[in-house]
Amino acid sequence: MKNLVQLLFFCLTVSCSSSIPLHSFEEEIPKQEPDYSNINHWIAHPEKFDGSDVLPINVTNDTFCLDSIDVFFVYPTIYTDGKDWNADINDVKLNEKINKLSLRNQANVFNGMGEIYSPIYRQMHIHGYKDNINGTKAFDVAYYDVENAFKYYLKNYNKGNRIVLAAHSQGTHHLQKLFTDYLLKNDSILKKVELAYLIGDRSVKAFSIRDFPHCEKPKDLNCFLSWNTYKSGVSASNYNGAEIPVTNPISWIDNGDASLYNEHLGILISDFKFIKQESQIKHPKMLSAEVNNGLLWVEIEKFKYLKLYEKYLRGDYHAIDYNLFWMNIRHNFYHRMH
C-alpha cells in the first residue's frame, strides 16, 4: 500500500499545479540562460552523482553493461507550481524534484549502459499547454536551451560515442523539434543518432521513412520508439491517433497484437523516503499492452490496489509511461544496442 501511494504521489506531482502565471510572457523578467560548460547546469552528467545513477535495489546486481554509448535525456514538465512562464535553472527545490521524479524513474533505466547527459533547461510551465500565445513563447525559450545543450554536448562530450536520445512529455516535444529544426537538416549528425525514445507525447509525428522511421522490431536501430499509455478502453479526449506511430514496449513488435502477460518484466515502484530514497521492481507478468488508435492500451491483471490506482490516474497513465515498462525497456535497450 505504501509503495503504491508513493507511486501515485509521483503521478500527481507531475500532472498537477497549484499556481500559474497570470501575466503576459513579455512582462516576465528573462531568466538566466544556462551555461553548459558549467557542470552544475546539467541535472545528469557522467562526472557527478545524480538520480540517473540510482538503480532499484533489486536491480543493482544485473549484468547489463555497454560501452561507448551516450544517452541525451530531456526530462518532462516538472515545473507545475510557479508564477513565471519559464523555470529558473537555479531553483534548488525544482532541481531536486527533477532528480527524484524524472531521473530516478526514467533516465536511470539506461544506467550502466550509457553515459547519461541531461541538461537543466528553462522548462515551460505546465500551464503553457493551455495558453497558445504565452505558452508558445515560453516553449521556444525552453527549446533554445535544449538545442544549445545538445550542440555543446556534441562538441565537447560525445567523442565519437553512439548517440541515443530519450525524453518524456515536454522533453519529447523538444526532441521532436530538435529533429525537425536541426537533425534532419544535418545528415552527418543524424547518422550518429542510433535510437530515440519519444515517449509521452500524443503529437509525435512519423518522420521521413528514409531519414528516421518508427522502429518495427525489437532490434531495429536508426529509428524511434514512442507510446502514450492508457487503461484499456479509455480514449484521449479530442484525439484521433490513426496516423500516430506507437511502440508496444513489452513485445517491441509493430504488428498490433497484444503482448503476453508473461512477457512483462515488472514495474518500477519508487520509494520516496526522507533523504534515502530506494526503489524496486515489482509486479512482473501483470500487464498486457496493445496499440489502439495512436495510444498504448494497458490491461492490468490481479493488481491488489487496482481500485486505488484507477481512482487517482483515471485511466491516463501518462506520468508512468516509463515506470510501467521500466524493466522491459532496460532489457530491450541492452539487447538492441549490444
Image (cartoon, grey):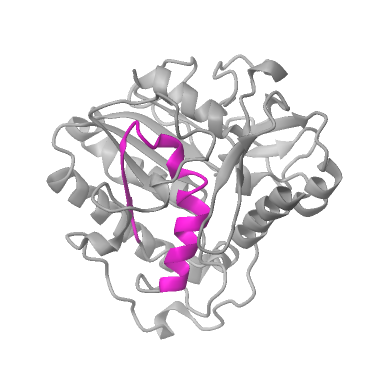
Q: Residue furthest right?
A: 307
Q: Is residue 132 left or right of residue 319?
A: left
Residue 262: image location, x then y, percent: 69, 17
- State which quarter of the image contains the C terminus: top left
In the image: residue 234, left or right of residue 51? right
Q: Residue at x 61, y 78 (%)?
A: 19
**Closer-to-camera residue (289/183):** 289
Residue 214 appears anywhere in the view:
no
Provide residue 269's location: percent of width, then percent of height.
Answer: 62, 43
Residue found 42% across the figure and 67% down from its top: 137
* Residue 329 in view, yes or no: yes
What is the x, y in percent for residue 190?
25, 32
Compared to 212, does 335 lie above or below? above
Q: Is residue 13 left or right of residue 96?
A: right
Residue beneath the point at 23% across and 59% down: 39
The residue positioned 47% from the left and 38% from the top of the image is 198
Residue 108 highlighted magenta (yes or no): yes
Magenta segment range? Answer: 92-120
The answer to if 209 sits in the magenta stretch is no
Question: Which image quadrant is residue 230 in?
Answer: top right
Question: How many numbered marks are there?
Answer: 0
Indicate whether 127 appears above or below 119: below
Tell me residue 84's x, y (percent).
48, 78
